[in-house]
């Protein structure tokens, strides 16, 4: 919703875990002239109270809090214009659809949801209500990724034949998905949905194409029960107050992180959620090593690999075309020290904390018959997902123009989700999966 002159757009947040913090800070600190935070909703009062305390640190008054069961009452009483959905992934559709039907627009964290029926429910609600859903694919706003989009759209490599995309999560960042609710595929859709939807959306956006067929293989190689085979397993369920976790580099020590202590350790009495599970404990139902081969509506192909246990963090993208090749390489951390292995990084604070181990980014155009050319990119930073978070919230909350059409729609969210869902089905069946067999988009 675009701000009207003299009126601030009223926002409410549902889901007050760590994922909400970036949005809350942007609303009250950076865009208070055009946007207003008016309420929190969650299943856990302690987490909402923590966010209200942090609002005080920013000089903002506390906002009303509502149990998630009273979500509709909150929308009506607080006259909400836009709902920010930052809850557990499997619950997104519940709040998105309810908000749309109440006359609100929605900004939802990625992934938009976790399966095809929930996705269809959201798309049907968008058509029925005429309201808008925006998926917070912040990677679109990274200056490096914007430049890739411009170069490909301008024909820098000609007609695109193939993309190779490798994403590496180091053993600090990758491990964090196996401590949290994300370890349960029913809650998160697995890393093909929760994490890789970012990357699949980028490829859709870069190619201006839609996925047609996906063939994939994935397994749990490193975490979960596999940790015993590799010699990493420890016999504890969660790290807090567990002597066996004292020297485990994979253990997250909640008590040492004041904000996470407030959000999770101090809130456990209400819902029993443990944020610091042993990454090698039984019960992990997601994969940590995944390979994908996808074909697109343009005829291009993509080979994609996600590794969640790498010694360094970053990604490589290579785009091959009829006139040359474009290469992007980003190093976010060159290594993880043993002392830092159990600390927070990247997703744990939603990209707000940069690694301390060094990093670099290069974008290189390699045309036929000419020397390679290094492309310089202004605005890239190692904080906030390459500077993307700030740029995204300027569009979402500040009314900044969006000539690159970076704001992802519900349809964009569905297309990114479908690649991951098709990959998950291919994991199970061992066969290629046609995306149209999962969900048909208009």
Image (cartoon, rainbow, N blue to C red):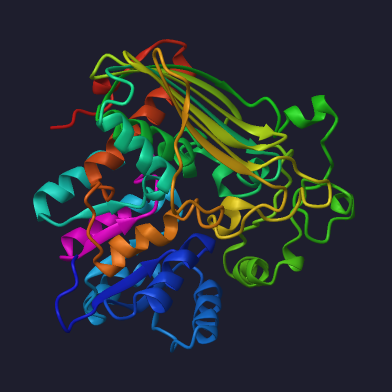
Q: Quadrant of residue 26?
A: bottom left
Q: Is residue 246 above or below residue 420?
A: below
Give the magenta-colored segment's residue range. 94-116
Split into 4 quadrants, where in the image is the N terminus?
A: bottom left
**Residue, far front:** 370
Magenta stretch: includes residue 111: yes
Q: Position of residue 368 (x, y in %)?
A: 39, 14
Q: Is residue 109 visible?
A: yes
**Coordinates of residue 44 in the picture (x, y in percent):** 51, 70
Which residue is rendered at x = 27% and y = 17% of the image? 159
In x, y percent, where is residue 384?
51, 57
Q: How many marks?
A: 0
Residue 116 in view = no
**In front: 302, or 414?**
302
Pick the front one: 35 or 68: 35
Which quadrant, please, contains the C terminus? top left
x and y, in percent, of residue 154 in the image: 25, 31
Q: Viewed as shown, does residue 359 lie left or right of 420? A: right
- Compared across the picture, whether 15 is left or right of 354 comes to left
* Furthest residue toward top: 431
Eyeballing the image, is 194 above or below 318?
A: below
Quarter where residue 167 is shown: top right
């Amino acid at each position: 919703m675009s701000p009207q002159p003299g009126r601030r757009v009223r926002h409410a947040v549902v889901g007050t875990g760590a994922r909400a913090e970036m949005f809350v800070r942007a609303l009250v600190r950076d865009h208070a002239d055009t946007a207003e935070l008016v309420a929190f909703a969650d299943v856990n009062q302690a987490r909402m109270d923590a966010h209200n305390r942090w609002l005080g640190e920013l000089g903002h008054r506390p906002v009303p809090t509502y149990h998630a069961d009273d979500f509709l009452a909150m929308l009506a009483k607080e006259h909400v214009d836009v709902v920010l959905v930052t809850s557990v992934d499997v619950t997104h559709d519940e709040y998105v659809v309810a908000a749309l039907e109440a006359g609100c627009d929605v900004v939802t964290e990625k992934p938009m949801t976790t399966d095809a029926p929930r996705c269809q429910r959201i798309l049907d609600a968008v058509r029925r209500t005429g309201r808008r859903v925006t998926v917070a694919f912040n990677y679109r706003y990274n200056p490096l990724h914007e430049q890739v989009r411009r170069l490909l759209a301008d024909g820098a490599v000609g007609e695109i034949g193939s993309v190779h995309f490798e994403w590496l999560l180091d053993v600090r960042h990758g491990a964090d998905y196996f401590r949290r609710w994300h370890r349960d595929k029913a809650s998160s859709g697995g890393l093909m949905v929760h994490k890789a939807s970012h990357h699949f959306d980028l490829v859709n956006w870069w190619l201006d194409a839609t996925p047609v067929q996906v063939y994939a293989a994935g397994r749990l190689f490193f975490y979960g029960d596999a940790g015993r085979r590799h010699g990493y397993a420890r016999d504890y369920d969660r790290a807090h107050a567990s002597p066996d976790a004292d020297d485990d580099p994979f253990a997250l020590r909640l008590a040492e992180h004041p904000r996470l202590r407030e959000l999770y350790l101090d809130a456990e009495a209400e819902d029993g959620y443990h944020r610091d599970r042993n990454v090698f404990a039984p019960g992990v139902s997601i994969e940590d090593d995944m390979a994908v081969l996808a074909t697109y509506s343009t005829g291009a192909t993509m080979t994609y690999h996600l590794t969640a246990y790498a010694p360094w963090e970053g990604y490589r993208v290579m785009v091959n075309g009829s006139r040359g090749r474009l290469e992007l390489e980003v190093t976010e951390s060159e290594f993880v020290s043993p002392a830092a292995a159990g600390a927070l990084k990247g997703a744990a604070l939603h990209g707000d904390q940069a690694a301390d181990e060094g990093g670099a980014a290069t974008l290189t155009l390699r045309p036929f018959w000419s020397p390679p050319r290094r492309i310089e990119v202004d605005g890239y930073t190692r904080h906030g997902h390459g500077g993307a978070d700030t740029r995204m919230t300027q569009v979402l909350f500040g009314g900044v123009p969006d000539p690159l059409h970076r704001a992802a729609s519900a349809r964009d969210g569905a297309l990114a989700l479908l690649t991951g869902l098709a990959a998950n089905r291919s994991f199970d069946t061992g066969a290629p999966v046609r995306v149209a067999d999962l969900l048909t988009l208009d």
